[in-house]
């Protein structure tokens, strides 16, 4: 069992017009992202990483404010309080309105802007076939481990729900 608080995060990542607070929960990190009105990925993060769009996936729950996301293909969606979203890599985002945007993200904390920049710099280096197959095997193993973690989570939730129903 792991219990953490965003009141005492292990890491704070300040960025222009916002901050990201990260807590490590063992197999996953969670981040509370807070962006001020006027924050936009293209203006506040692109200068750090150099990509034309955010290349990090996000799985989040919105606490406060609104944010609009635009995918590289042009599709858009706006998220507000209570919404839950899954955003794949390849997007821009900006706050909407005059209040801060606050969300809890369970996927985006795994990668810092510096890591994204390094990944981008390395992505132009051709890989030998043996290296590619090694990377594919590594990715498959990580996906398998992630699926196992989700399966464990589902089983724990089902057991808890069953236990709670039977408790006096």
Image: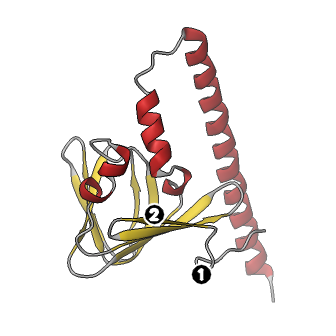
Q: Secondary structure at mark 1?
A: loop
Q: Badge 1: few (under 14), some or many (20 or more) residues near its Cα, within 10 Å?
A: few
Q: Position of residue 46 (x, y in %)?
A: 31, 50
- Residue displayed at 74% across by 63% down: 156
Q: 137 or 11: which is nearer to us?
A: 11
Q: Is residue 56 above or below residue 102?
A: above
Q: Is residue 113 above or below residue 96?
A: above
Cα separation, mark 2 vs mark 1, equals 19 Å
Q: Position of residue 129 (x, y in %)?
A: 55, 10
Q: Position of residue 13 (x, y in %)?
A: 49, 64
- Residue displayed at 65% across by 52% down: 150
The number of numbered discs placed on residues in the rendered structure image is 2
Q: Position of residue 8 (x, y in %)?
A: 63, 78
What numbered label is drawn on residue 66?
A: none
Question: Taking 161 as reference, is 6 left or right?
Answer: left
**Looking at the figure, which quarter contains the C terminus?**
bottom right
- Residue displayed at 32% across by 41% down: 51
Which mark is nearer the camera, 2 or 1?
Answer: 1
Q: 45 or 140: which is nearer to us?
A: 45
Q: Which residue is mark 1?
A: 7
Q: Badge 2: few (under 14), some or many (20 or more) residues near its Cα, within 10 Å?
A: many
Q: Mark 2 vs mark 1: which is more N-terminal?
A: 1
Quadrant of residue 141 within the rendered picture: top right
- Residue displayed at 69% across by 58% down: 153
Residue found at the far top of this picture: 129
**Looking at the figure, which quarter contains the N terminus?**
bottom right
Q: Are marks 2 and 1 in contact (CB under 8 Å)?
A: no
Q: Secondary structure at mark 2?
A: strand
Q: 102 or 151: which is nearer to us?
A: 102
Residue found at the far bottom of this picture: 168
What numbered label is drawn on residue 60?
A: 2
């Amino acid at each position: 069992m792991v219990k953490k608080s965003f009141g005492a995060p292990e890491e704070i990542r300040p960025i222009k017009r916002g901050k990201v607070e990260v807590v490590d929960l063992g197999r996953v990190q969670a981040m509370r992202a807070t962006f001020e009105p006027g924050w936009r990925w293209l203006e506040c993060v692109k200068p750090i990483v150099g990509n034309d769009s955010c290349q990090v996936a996000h799985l989040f729950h919105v606490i406060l404010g609104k944010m609009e996301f635009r995918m590289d293909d042009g599709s858009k969606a706006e998220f507000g309080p209570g919404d839950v979203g899954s955003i794949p890599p390849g997007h821009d985002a900006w706050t909407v309105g005059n209040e801060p945007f606050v969300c809890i993200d369970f996927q985006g904390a795994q990668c810092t802007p510096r890591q994204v920049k390094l990944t981008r710099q390395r992505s132009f280096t051709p890989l030998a076939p043996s290296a590619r197959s090694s990377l594919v095997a590594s990715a498959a193993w990580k996906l398998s481990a992630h699926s196992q973690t989700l399966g464990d989570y589902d089983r724990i939730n089902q057991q808890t729900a069953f236990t709670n129903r039977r408790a006096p």
